[in-house]
Image (tube, helix red, strand yellow):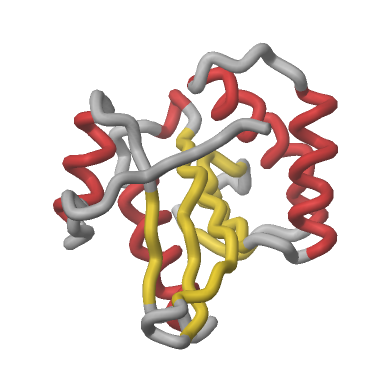
């Protein structure tokens, strides 16, 4: 297995995984929406999408980072918003590899910080993040509004 930055040529495989990812979060399947959304990200370069590729060449996982700025550090930063591994490839180290390589890619881009959010009941993901040295922030609340 290897990881690399995704391009528009990866759209079909990435869109299928993105649709599965959305279903994991209780959204209805909508492959057309997944293709449209991921085509925009990949063609505009508005996010960094890393894919994990199995030895035979199929894409079995992805992570997506969106660029931000860290005002306090006065440097670029990223939010790691999506991490998904196909069921057939889970528990094989794909998620861990994607996380490690995402941090390295963000460093290459000059990022001073990467953040992510996960559900309070997502114990496996929390164990992965903490095992890789990520620190949970218990000092700040996150607020959101859906206009």
Q: Residue at x 34, y 38 (%)?
A: 118
- Position of 49 with respect to 129 (left or right) is right
From the top left corner, tell me how far across and down residue 66 is, in percent: 58, 60
Residue 46 in the image: above or below residue 69: above
Q: Residue visible at 17% across and 50% down? A: 138
At 75% across and 19% down in the image, what residue appears? 30
Q: Can residue 146 be spotted in the picture?
A: yes
Q: Is residue 115 above or below residue 39?
A: below
Q: List x then y, in percent, for residue 1.
A: 45, 53
Q: Is residue 8 left or right of residue 54?
A: right
Q: Is 61 rendered above or below residue 77?
A: above
Residue 107, compared with residue 131, is above or below; it is below
Image quadrant where residue 31 sits: top right
Which quadrant of the view contains residue 38?
top right
Q: Residue at x 61, y 42 (%)?
A: 58
User: Picture coordinates of residue 108 (x, y %)?
Assistant: 49, 83
Q: Is residue 55 visible?
A: no
């Amino acid at each position: 297995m290897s990881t690399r930055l995704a391009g528009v040529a990866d759209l079909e495989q990435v869109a299928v995984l993105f649709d599965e990812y959305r279903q994991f979060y209780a959204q209805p399947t909508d492959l057309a929406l997944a293709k449209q959304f991921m085509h925009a990200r990949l063609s505009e370069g508005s996010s960094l999408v890393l894919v994990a590729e199995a030895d035979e060449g199929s894409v079995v996982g992805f992570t997506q980072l969106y660029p931000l700025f860290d005002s306090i550090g006065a440097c670029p930063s990223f939010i790691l918003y999506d991490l998904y591994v196909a069921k057939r490839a889970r528990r094989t180290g794909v998620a861990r590899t994607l996380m490690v390589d995402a941090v390295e890619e963000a460093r290459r881009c000059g990022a001073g910080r990467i953040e992510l959010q996960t559900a309070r009941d997502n114990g496996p993901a929390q164990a992965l993040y903490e095992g890789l040295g990520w620190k949970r922030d218990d000092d700040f609340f996150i607020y959101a509004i859906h206009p």
